[in-house]
Amino acid sequence: MTSTTPPDVAAHVESLIPQFQLTRLLNSDQAGRRISLQGTISSQPALLIAERAAFDTSTPTLASFSTSLRNIKNLGANDIYAWFLANSNPNFTGENGEPPPDFKLNLIYPCTEKHIKKYEKQGLRVVTETPEIYAKYVRPYMQRQREKGALNWVFNIIEGRTEQEDVMYREHGDEGFLLLPDLNWDRKTLGGLHLLGLVERRDIWSVRDLKRVMVEWVKHMRTKMIEATVKLYPEIEKDQLKLYVHYQPTYYHFHIHIVHVALEAGNTQATGKALGLENIISQLEMLTGESNAGMQDVSLTYHLGERSDLWEKVYLPLKEGREVKIEDF
């Protein structure tokens, strides 16, 4: 970015930054990506608001990005997923004598075309999934995705093969579940806290499989997950936590997201993607009819990326009056 400030003025104000003397931290928000500092410069009060700058997306910079990282520290690994902290300025050292990490990295290797579509910028479409569309098209699509083995990393955790040191709370049995850090959390910024609750049973693929008779179990999970979180992180109070599920989820094994209420509400918490757990419980309680009545009986409206399989293979053909080819799932 080119500055429009006169060179002499720019030189002066740039020289002020190193003179800033910290008094106290005023705020840390956007999941720790922005800080507001109170301090002084030449004994005069000053404020310094710092944000992580946008990435330089020029081809030469991106081509050397992975080789420019230093002090790469792995936080965890499971199947094709791994996540790290890393530093881009090895010349600066923190209190422990090591450069503080300024990048949180996730690695998916080897990745699939579905992963690429998920992270690629694309247009969005709002769709309404009726019970009929779910039963006829979406449920078979979910089954096909599960058959492809994309849930190996989930089963590794549930069966005790990986990430057991990260499990924060667990109950076994038909209604068992466990709680552990989400791979997108750096595990230290409480304002960006993001935990994951995985159910043990494998017949609940998504919120669609929740039934009215399961209300007490869902309430129990909610209570235990909140209690475990505030016990592990006493700086957080119960009313500072938000629980939700995704629909459509990234993977078809039912899970609950537990986040700090201050976590920046990006697309993953937006209307059309996230369903509040409290609202799901209320909706289940209001269902009438047979005992097996559940979320499979309601219409759900959500958004999809234009490059997602569900849009390309289900909703776009329906919109255009074409046949949905289930065999292509």
Image: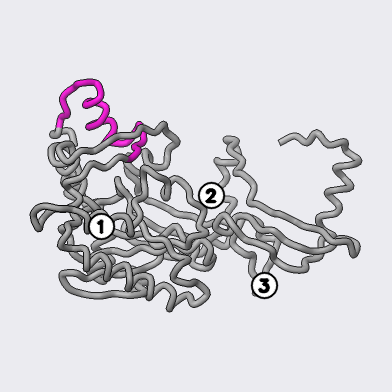
Asked if disc 1 and disc 3 are in contact, CB closer than 8 Å, the reply is no
Q: Which residue is mark 1?
A: 254
Q: Is residue 317 visible?
A: yes
Residues shaded magenta: 302-325
Q: Is residue 312 magenta?
A: yes
Please identify the quadrant where the C terminus is shown.
top left
N-terminal-most mark, 2 or 1? 2
Colour convention of the picture: one colour
Q: Which residue is mark 2?
A: 66
Horizontal and vertical percent for residue 182? Answer: 40, 61
Q: Amino acid at mark 1?
A: Phe
Viewer-side residue, 182 vs 280? 280
Q: Secondary structure at mark 2?
A: helix
Q: Amino acid at mark 2?
A: Ser
Residue for point 82% across, 61% down: 20
Instruction: Estimate the spatial distance between the alpha carbons at disc 2 and disc 1, rounded to whole Å.
Output: 34 Å
Horizontal and vertical percent for residue 160? Answer: 26, 71
Marking on residue 101 = none
Q: Which residue is mark 3?
A: 97
N-terminal-most mark, 2 or 3? 2
**Tag 2: Cα neighbours inside 10 Å, few (<14), some, or many (≥20)?**
few
Instruction: Estimate the spatial distance between the alpha carbons at disc 1 and disc 3, rounded to whole Å.
Output: 43 Å
Instruction: Estimate the spatial distance between the alpha carbons at disc 2 and disc 3, rounded to whole Å.
Output: 23 Å
Q: Amino acid at mark 3?
A: Gly
Residue for point 77% across, 57% down: 47
* Quarter occupied by residue 1: top right
Residue for point 48% across, 51% down: 265
Above-or-below relation of 69 to 159: above
Viewer-side residue, 277 vs 134? 277
192 horizontally vs 48: left or right: left
Q: Secondary structure at mark 1?
A: loop
